[in-house]
Image (cartoon, coloured by chain):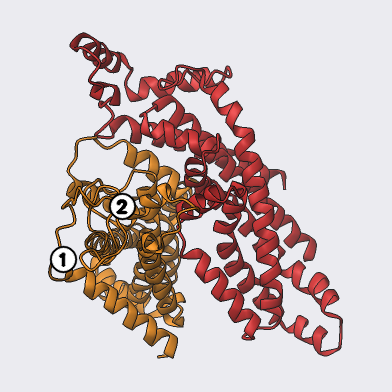
Chain colours: A orange, B red
């Protein structure tokens, strides 16, 4: 492991650890308002100051990181599973099914992902709870983000279909489900794992964009997307570095994930 | 070639029909479709709210809506936007020029910057330049498009450059790898070892072998640019198609959403097909 990857892994572990332990580390609940201190600078009581509604920014960053860092991998898992089912089955079965599945994949890929996401997310009811909105947002990311992975998995599954050991397994009378479970899936595992890891930073960034457009996780539950909305009221004249902490944290996590992903086994 | 073009044309047509139906289905059956934000307006009395709800009930079902929409589309009528009460064709026409200009400038700037970095990086791999460019693009890809939009808005920089910055890392990464593969080909290595100038090697040997894949990448970059235009136009307050899509999504404007989906699908499918056909023609020329 290179030094850069060691540093990236350590930083990622620290950020993940801090967000998981948000209950213990946060000085106050994320929704608690200090109405006499709206938009205050950092102090001994509020390490990163307060937002415009007087809520402790440090607590919100900790809880927001937890929401983004726990739900983005969940969304990645959903999209990878969908891609594995669609791409894996299409590649293995071949013929018309493969052509139809790939045409559907192309159709999904031809629509810009964020455009589709924006349209679907905006059509959800207005009165859903913040927790449900977080789950729904990340589930949508997972459900709509399978297409690119499916194409890669389909290509791999298709090459496995024609491999010697699969042909031998079929010739010896093994049923298709068993061939899939015993021979195809274990060989697809590295590709699936790579697609899972690649999806995480993409989903973190997509949630941030949705949050900035007001279509992400609903208030008062924080996420990196909703925390970045604060930047819209940011003025070039009033330069407050502490307001940039959520952005720096997001950039650090995405960069760390990319450094870890630069491993050749994952990018293959 | 004619057969290939006809096949692409059929694919485009089918993609448009299914893409439009998909958009209409998603919108029509979304759990919040029946909800109208106007109902939350405390100034409205009960009668007004009942009238708004009855408007919704009077709207046709999905199949009826889509068939009716397609028949009108053949006559050039895109319907009326429910949120702004104006013909959808007018709204789209007004905003299309803004988006086309922004995406056009963004694409040109992105490709110029990406190739400016990718060519030297591919020519001299694993050098400090290569590492520097990888770091710059790696940093850019970690910034959400929305944050770039806010920064560009604050400093009054052109929104098209924000689109370019979203595209640069993606185009750079693929272009660098494609060019590096081109430089590693045996005939290119031979040409370089025989002392051919770098410019000649690049234009005579590397570009012809990598052009089809670069063209395919150009097609994909159009789709990425449209996706990036949505948050950038919305947050930079640019009156383009991206901003219109955002407003249409928030207002649950089915007519406008279906039209915009069809336009976006048309642009991306045509761009991909054109790059595919050009790439195939180039490959035949090389052979």
Q: Quadrant of the C terminus of chain B?
A: bottom right
Residue B49 located left or right of residue B179: left
Mark 2 surroundings: few (<14), some (14-19) or many (≥20) residues within 10 A = some
Q: Is residue B27 placed above or below A14 in the rendered structure?
A: above
**Which residue is most to the top?**
B47
Residue A87 in the image: x percent, y percent? 38, 60
Where is B171 relative to B133, above or below? above
Give how far across and how far down residue A131 sits, in percent. 18, 50
Measured from the top left, where is residue A56 in percent x and y? 23, 58
Q: Which secondary structure, mark 2?
A: loop
Badge 1 crowding class, 10 Å Cα cut-off, few under 14, some 14 to 19, many 20 or more, is some
Question: Can residue A120 be seen in this snapshot?
Answer: yes
Tell me where residue B211 sits by quadrant: bottom right
Q: Secondary structure at mark 1?
A: loop
Q: Residue at x 39, y 37 (%)?
A: B22
The residues tagged by marks 1 and 2 sit, at their Cα atoms, a distance apart of 17 Å
- 1 and 2 marks on the same chain: yes
The residue located at (14%, 58%) in the rendering is A29
- Quickly name the residue at label 1: A27
Viewer-side residue, B20 vs B88: B88
Question: Going from the N terminus, do you reach mark 1 or mark 2 first?
Answer: 1
Q: Please tell me whether mark 1 or mark 2 is closer to you in this view.
A: 2
Q: Is residue B14 visible?
A: no
Residue receiving disc 2: A39
Chain holding disc 2? A
Residue A114, numbered circle:
none
The answer to whether residue A259 is above or below residue B226 is below
Instruction: Tell which of B96 and A232 is nearer to you.
Output: A232
Q: Is B36 displayed left or right of A104 in the figure?
A: left
Q: Quadrant of residue B127?
A: bottom right
User: The disc numbered 1 marks a residue on which chain?
Assistant: A
């Amino acid at each position: 492991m290179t030094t850069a990857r060691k540093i990236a892994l350590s930083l990622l572990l620290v950020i993940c650890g801090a967000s998981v332990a948000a209950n213990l580390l946060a000085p106050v609940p994320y929704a608690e308002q200090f109405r006499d201190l709206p938009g205050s600078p950092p102090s001994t009581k509020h390490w990163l100051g307060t937002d415009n509604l007087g809520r402790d920014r440090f607590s919100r960053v900790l809880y927001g990181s937890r929401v983004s860092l726990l739900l983005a991998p969940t969304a990645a898992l959903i999209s990878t599973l969908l891609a594995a089912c669609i791409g894996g089955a299409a590649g293995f079965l071949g013929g018309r099914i493969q052509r139809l599945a790939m045409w559907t994949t192309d159709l999904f890929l031809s629509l810009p992902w964020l455009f589709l996401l924006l349209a679907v997310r905006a059509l959800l009811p207005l009165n859903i709870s913040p927790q449900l909105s977080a789950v729904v947002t990340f589930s949508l990311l997972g459900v709509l983000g399978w297409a690119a992975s499916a194409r890669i998995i389909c290509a791999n599954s298709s090459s496995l279909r024609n491999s010697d050991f699969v042909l031998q397994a079929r010739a010896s009378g093994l049923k298709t489900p068993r061939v899939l479970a015993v021979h195809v899936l274990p060989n697809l595992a590295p590709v699936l794992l790579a697609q899972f890891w690649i999806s995480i930073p993409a989903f973190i960034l997509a949630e941030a964009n949705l949050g900035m457009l007001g279509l992400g996780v609903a208030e008062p539950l924080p996420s990196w997307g909703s925390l970045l909305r604060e930047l819209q009221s940011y003025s070039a004249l009033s330069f407050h570095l502490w307001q940039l902490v959520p952005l720096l944290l997001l950039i650090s996590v995405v960069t760390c994930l990319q450094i870890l992903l630069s491993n050749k086994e994952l990018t293959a | 070639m004619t057969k290939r073009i006809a096949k692409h044309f059929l694919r485009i047509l089918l993609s448009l029909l299914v893409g439009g139906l998909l958009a209409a289905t998603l919108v029509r059956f979304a759990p919040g479709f029946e909800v109208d934000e106007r109902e939350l307006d405390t100034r409205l009395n009960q009668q007004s709210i009942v009238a708004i709800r009855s408007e919704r009930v009077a709207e046709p079902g999905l199949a009826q809506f889509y068939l009716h929409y397609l028949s009108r589309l053949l006559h050039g009528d895109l319907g009326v936007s429910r949120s702004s009460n104006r013909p959808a064709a007018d709204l789209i026409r007004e905003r299309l020029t803004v988006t086309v200009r922004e995406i056009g400038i963004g694409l040109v700037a992105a490709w110029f910057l990406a190739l400016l970095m990718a060519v030297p990086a591919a020519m001299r791999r694993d050098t400090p330049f290569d590492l520097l460019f990888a770091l710059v693009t790696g940093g850019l890809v970690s910034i959400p498009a929305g944050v770039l939009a806010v920064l560009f808005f604050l400093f009054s920089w052109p929104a098209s450059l924000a689109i370019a910055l979203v595209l640069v890392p993606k185009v750079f990464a693929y272009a660098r790898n494609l060019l590096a593969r081109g430089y590693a080909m045996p005939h290119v290595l031979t040409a370089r070892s025989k002392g051919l100038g770098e410019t000649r090697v690049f234009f005579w040997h590397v570009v012809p072998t990598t052009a089809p894949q670069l063209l395919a990448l150009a097609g994909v970059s159009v789709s990425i640019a449209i996706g990036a235009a949505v948050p950038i136009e919305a947050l930079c307050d640019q009156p383009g198609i991206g901003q219109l899509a955002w407003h249409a999504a928030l207002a649950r404007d089915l007519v406008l959403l279906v039209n915009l989906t069809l336009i976006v699908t048309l642009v991306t499918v045509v761009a991909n097909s054109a790059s595919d056909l050009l790439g195939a023609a180039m490959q035949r020329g090389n052979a």
